[in-house]
Image (cartoon, rainbow, N blue to C red):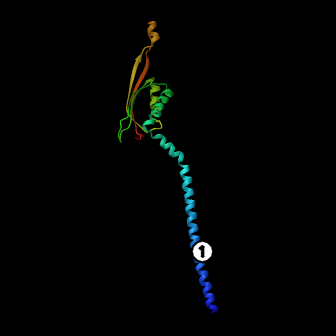
């Protein structure tokens, strides 16, 4: 009878150990899930700024003003006179806005504008660029009837397409 009692106690202890091991496994799984969830939350917070930066590159129809202001801003920075002649925003799944404009100034200024245009924070395709040299005599010299060296003024005609556009 004593051995049966010991057998019964041993069986209960063995059963208890199995339950304890199962509970420990569950606790470890839950701890791992909690750590994974916290890691994921930290990762999402860390990429939030990058996500906002990437989203700022993609413009919607209401945001086209930002692009136009960017074109004007780089015009001021490079010293050219900018004139936007057309903006076509067709409705459609694959349509992207096409902006036609001209810039006028000295050759170095036009070239600087082209450099700034290529480095705008938007994905654009420059479809057409044409440079024209316009010889202009100084108005003051014409009024004085004096011969002067002509001032070299350049005009560039641009046609760009905004690739980072969402309808």
Residue depicted at x 63% and y 88%:
6
Where is residue 57? Give x, y as percent: 47, 40
Residue 88 lies in quadrant? top left
Residue 153 lies in quadrant? top left
**12 or 52: nearer the eye?**
12
Where is residue 145? Give x, y as percent: 44, 6
Residue 13 lies in quadrant? bottom right
Residue depicted at x 45% and y 27%:
110
Could you tell me how many numbered marks the image carries? 1
Q: Is residue 107 left or right of residue 90?
A: right
Q: Is residue 149 left or right of residue 91?
A: right
How crowded is the residue under tag 1: few (<14 C-alpha within 10 Å), some, or many (20+)? few
Residue marked by disc 1: 20
Where is residue 53? Give x, y as percent: 51, 42
Residue depicted at x 46% and y 34%:
67
Q: Is residue 96 left or right of residue 79?
A: left
**127 or 25: nearer the eye?**
25
161 over 139 or under it: above or below? below
The C terminus: image quadrant: top left
Where is residue 87? Give x, y as percent: 39, 31
29 over 73 or under it: above or below? below
The N terminus: image quadrant: bottom right
Q: What element does badge 1 sit on?
A: helix
Residue depicted at x 46% and y 10%:
141
Q: Residue furthest right?
A: 2
């Amino acid at each position: 009878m004593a051995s049966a009692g010991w057998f019964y106690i041993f069986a209960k202890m063995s059963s208890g150990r199995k339950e304890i091991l199962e509970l420990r496994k569950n606790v470890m799984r839950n701890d791992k899930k909690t750590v994974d969830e916290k890691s994921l939350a930290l990762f999402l917070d860390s990429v939030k700024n990058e996500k906002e930066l990437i989203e700022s590159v993609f413009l919607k129809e209401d945001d086209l003003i930002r692009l136009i202001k960017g074109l004007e801003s780089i015009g001021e920075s490079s010293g050219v006179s900018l004139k936007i002649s057309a903006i076509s925003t067709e409705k459609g799944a694959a349509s992207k806005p096409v902006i036609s404009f001209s810039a006028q100034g000295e050759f170095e200024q036009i070239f600087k504008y082209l450099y700034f245009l290529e480095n705008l924070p938007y994905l654009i395709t420059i479809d057409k660029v044409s440079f024209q040299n316009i010889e202009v005599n100084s108005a003051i010299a014409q009024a004085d009837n004096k011969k002067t060296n002509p001032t070299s003024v350049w005009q560039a005609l641009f046609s760009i397409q905004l690739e980072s556009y969402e309808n």
